[in-house]
Amino acid sequence: MTTTYLNDVDLPTVGALVQAVQEDPDKGQTTWKSEVTWGGAFRTTAQSRDLAPVAFDEPPGLGGTNTAPNPVEQLLGALGSCLVIGYAANASVAGIELKDLRIELEGDLDLQTFLGLGDGNAGFSSIGAKVHIEADAEDEAIQALHEKVIATSPVGHCLSRSVPLEVSLA
């Protein structure tokens, strides 16, 4: 059996997943997990599946030891990664060969609530992302790709919609 790849995406595997969920929508209902462990000071690691732990830390200006990105930087990275995956998958299905793909992200955050100096939003007040795509495709095809990715990004949807959150003591 020959596997077809475009942009290093295994198209038969992606196609089989789409077909399986089309035939049985319950197969599209998934649960994802991560366990985070404190490593002293502001260092933590997040463990997902059987993969190597991902490190988190804070920069020195926030009291950390600067050994890894902090949680909000990782959140920006998660959004950017989700978008890149969406562009790669959807470009491949559309037959668009990507030559370069990069996303610059930044978010504005006021530390007053986090530091206990006021009430309000401890999270980002806004997030911006600038997508750079180089591909042999018409501008209309790139625009359609962009619209589809924005409309289907799981992390984008989590950040742009209210998601119920329950944090409880065990």
Image: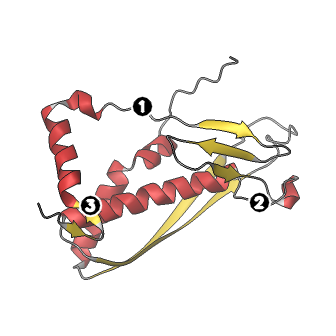
Instruction: Kindly identify which numbered label has been placed on residue 67.
Output: 2
Give the quadrant of the N terminus: bottom left
Farthest-out residue, front: 1
Left or right? Give the position of 147 relative to 163.
left
Picture residue at 68% right of the left edge, 17% below the top: 170
Q: Secondary structure at mark 3?
A: helix
Most extreme residue toward the top, as rendered? 170
Dot 1 corresponds to which residue?
31
Residue beneath the point at 34% across and 63% down:
87
Q: Residue 8 in the image: x percent, y percent?
A: 30, 68
Q: Earlier in the sequence, mark 2 or mark 3?
A: 2
Q: Which mark is in front, 3 or 1?
A: 1
Spatial CA span between label 3 and label 1? 23 Å
Q: Give the residue type at disc 3.
A: Asn
- Label 2: how many residues lie within 10 Å, few (<14), some (14-19) or many (20+)? some
Residue 27 x %, y %: 25, 32
Q: Does residue 145 sit above or below 34 in this rendering? A: below
Three-letter amino acid code of the residue under disc 2: Thr
- Name the residue beneath numbered marker 3: 90
Q: For label 1, count other residues whose C-alpha is less than 10 Å away and answer few (under 14), some (14-19) or many (20+).
A: few
Q: Quadrant for residue 77, please give it.
A: bottom right
